[in-house]
Image (cartoon, helix red, strand yellow):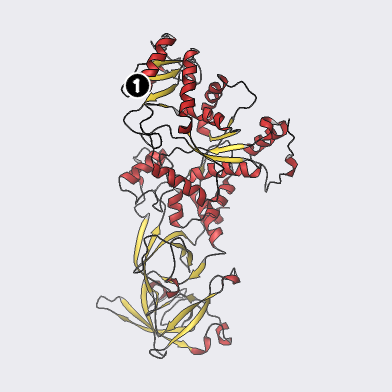
């Protein structure tokens, strides 16, 4: 038996229960001290943040205990699978910072699984049933009432072999026959009541095997056996598979005689409020045009979170914070938002962006004069340096930063004798404004004190407020997409209403006339910035040379920090 020294493992924090299981197995020398996990997505949709939790677990266990983690696509249902999903899943895993040891598919084992099914038939442990899926479901009974045996349950082995051969050759129409395991129709675990092992699918070619196969294994039959063929030691699943574990073990018991066998263990899945995690519901949102695609920044998909501006570090930090338990619950989305703020705060450049621009004219500043000022990119990291900001007589400021008849507690621009500092520039004082025929202010006038330039001795003079600005001639037009929570209720899945009727009508607001600094002219998609006093933003792939597009990742206000 191989000796394994677990004392060399120095966890950053107390072990979660899966890690405790692994360490106990290592101490006992199970599987010769070998650790092998797998991440087994079905290629029938895009990964979401719940999958990110499983990814962190599967790859994290292998990494921590010097094992290997493989990526295996459980591609047993050609009706719903697509190469598009295979490619996106691989991209998302790599983006999160993980790399699999080997790439496998359940379809790699189709012949082995088929051979095993024939063995089951020969041993009297499986039979062909000609009843419809609806009838089979009805005959399963209830948790408190035994099921009804199929009239085909005790047909001769030779007849089962002949029928299964006809199914395999495509001689039987879809839905006319299935192969079922012969276990116990009175078992307290409903999954033991003669589960279906194979069904016929001839109408959809498989994304890898084409039309080679006419019968396909069910997930419960393919999963554990694929784990075994592959050499998996710890098959880690979410809690909904806990009731499947006895069946997982039963299938293995029928043909595994050696010491090695995979062990299935379960942890709580990730539920996030104000969203849905169901692939079916997300597919509906996409297909019905209720969102702009799988990568819509309001979606909980990994590609959607990436497009919104979330970083791999922030997602992994979030997963680390919530941990792994055996108790289901719902996580507050504000913790996820807290994690991205925590990640971006020390490293995102802070820039001026004017969302609702109004022109500010400095009447005592020389006409046609321009000067270059410098502003720090991030006060928390001096190594990020400074950037140039062009300054001139005419600037854009936020409309909300001026009030003609201001109250005493308004400390921004107002023709009431109050002074404010223009960010990284001068102290100014409002003198008046210009209005259009509707009485709307269209220009604000002020004077500046040339002796108060930031970075000079006079620049240290304190005033009660600092406002952001962008010089008019150098300003870049930008579209800003303000994303909020997709649903208006915390738990749309538990509501009696159709989940589509619970969508938040304000989950996307578009600002078309934003003005940003010229320094942003060479940005590229997924670059991160903090728009001063507004929030964190990322550059969207819809950006072009003619027009920049920014997505709001998260606002500056951190509601989670207040809760804790």
Residue 339 in percent (x, y) is at 54, 55
In front of the other: 436 or 247: 247
Q: Is residue 154 left or right of residue 336?
A: left
| 249 w.r.t. 67: above or below | above
In front of the other: 531 or 364: 531
Quarter where residue 16 is shown: top right
Mark 1 residue crowding within 10 angstroms, few (<14) / some (14–19) / many (20+):
few
Numbered marks: total: 1
On-image quarter of the N terminus: top right
Residue drawn 46% across and 35% down? Answer: 74
Residue located beneath label 1 in the image: 134
Residue 395 in percent (x, y) is at 40, 80
Res 313 seen here? yes
| 429 w.r.t. 173: above or below | below
In front of the other: 451 or 45: 45
| 284 w.r.t. 197: above or below | below
Res 491 seen here? no
Q: Residue furthest left?
A: 437
Residue 412 in percent (x, y) is at 45, 76
Quarter where residue 59 is shown: top right
Q: Is residue 430 left or right of residue 40?
A: left
Quarter where residue 457 is shown: bottom right
Check disc 1 and report its element: helix, strand or loop. Answer: helix
Q: Is residue 498 left or right of residue 378?
A: left
Residue 253 in percent (x, y) is at 57, 20
| 74 w.r.t. 319: above or below | above
């Amino acid at each position: 038996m191989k000796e394994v020294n677990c004392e060399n493992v120095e966890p950053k924090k107390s072990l979660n229960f899966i890690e405790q299981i692994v360490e106990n197995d290592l101490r006992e020398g199970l599987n010769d001290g070998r650790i092998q996990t797998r991440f087994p997505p079905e290629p029938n949709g895009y990964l979401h943040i719940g999958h990110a939790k499983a990814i962190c677990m599967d790859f994290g266990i292998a990494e921590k205990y010097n094992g290997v983690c493989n990526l295996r696509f459980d591609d047993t249902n050609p009706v719903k699978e697509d190469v598009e999903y295979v490619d996106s899943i691989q991209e998302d895993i790599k983006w999160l910072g993980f790399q699999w040891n080997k790439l496998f598919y359940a379809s790699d084992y189709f012949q082995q699984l088929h051979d095993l099914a024939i063995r089951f038939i020969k041993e009297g442990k499986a039979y062909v049933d000609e009843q419809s899926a609806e009838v089979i479901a009805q005959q399963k009974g209830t948790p408190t009432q035994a099921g009804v045996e199929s009239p085909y349950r005790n047909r001769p082995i030779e007849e089962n072999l002949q029928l299964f051969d006809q199914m395999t050759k495509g001689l039987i129409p879809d839905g006319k026959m299935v192969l079922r395991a012969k276990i116990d129709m009175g078992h307290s675990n409903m999954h033991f009541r003669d589960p279906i092992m194979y069904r016929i699918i001839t109408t959809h070619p498989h994304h890898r095997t084409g039309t080679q196969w006419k019968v396909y294994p069910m997930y419960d039959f393919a999963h554990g056996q694929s784990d075994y063929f592959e050499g998996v030691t710890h098959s880690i699943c979410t809690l909904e598979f806990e009731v499947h574990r006895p069946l997982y073990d039963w299938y293995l018991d029928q043909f595994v005689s050696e010491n090695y066998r995979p062990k299935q263990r379960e942890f709580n899945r990730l539920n996030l409020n104000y969203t849905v995690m169901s692939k079916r519901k997300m597919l509906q949102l996409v297909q019905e045009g209720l969102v702009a695609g799988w990568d819509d920044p309001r979606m909980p998909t990994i590609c959607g979170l990436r497009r919104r501006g979330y970083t791999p570090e922030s997602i992994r930090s979030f997963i680390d914070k919530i941990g792994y338990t055996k108790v289901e619950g719902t996580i507050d989305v504000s913790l996820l938002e807290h994690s991205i703020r925590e990640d971006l705060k020390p490293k995102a450049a802070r820039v001026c962006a004017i969302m609702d621009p109004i022109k500010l004219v400095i009447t005592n500043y020389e006409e046609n004069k321009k000067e270059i000022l410098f502003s720090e990119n991030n006060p928390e990291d001096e190594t990020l340096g400074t950037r140039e900001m062009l300054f001139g007589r005419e600037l854009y400021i936020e409309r909300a930063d001026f009030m003609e008849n201001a109250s005493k507690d308004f400390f921004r621009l107002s023709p009431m004798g109050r002074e404010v500092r223009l960010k990284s520039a001068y102290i100014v004082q409002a003198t008046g404004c210009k209005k259009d025929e509707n009485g709307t202010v269209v220009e604000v006038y002020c004077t500046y004190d040339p002796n108060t330039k930031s970075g000079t001795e006079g620049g240290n003079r304190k005033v009660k407020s600092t406002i952001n600005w962008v010089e008019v001639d150098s300003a870049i037009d930008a579209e800003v997409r303000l994303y909020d929570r997709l649903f208006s209720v915390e738990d749309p899945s538990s509501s009696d209403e159709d989940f589509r009727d619970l969508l938040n009508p304000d989950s996307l607001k578009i600002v078309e006339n934003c003005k940003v600094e010229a320094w942003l002219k060479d940005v590229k998609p997924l670059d991160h910035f903090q728009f001063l006093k507004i929030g964190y933003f990322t550059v969207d792939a819809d950006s072009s040379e003619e027009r920049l597009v920014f997505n709001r990742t998260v606002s500056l206000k951190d509601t989670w920090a207040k809760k804790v």
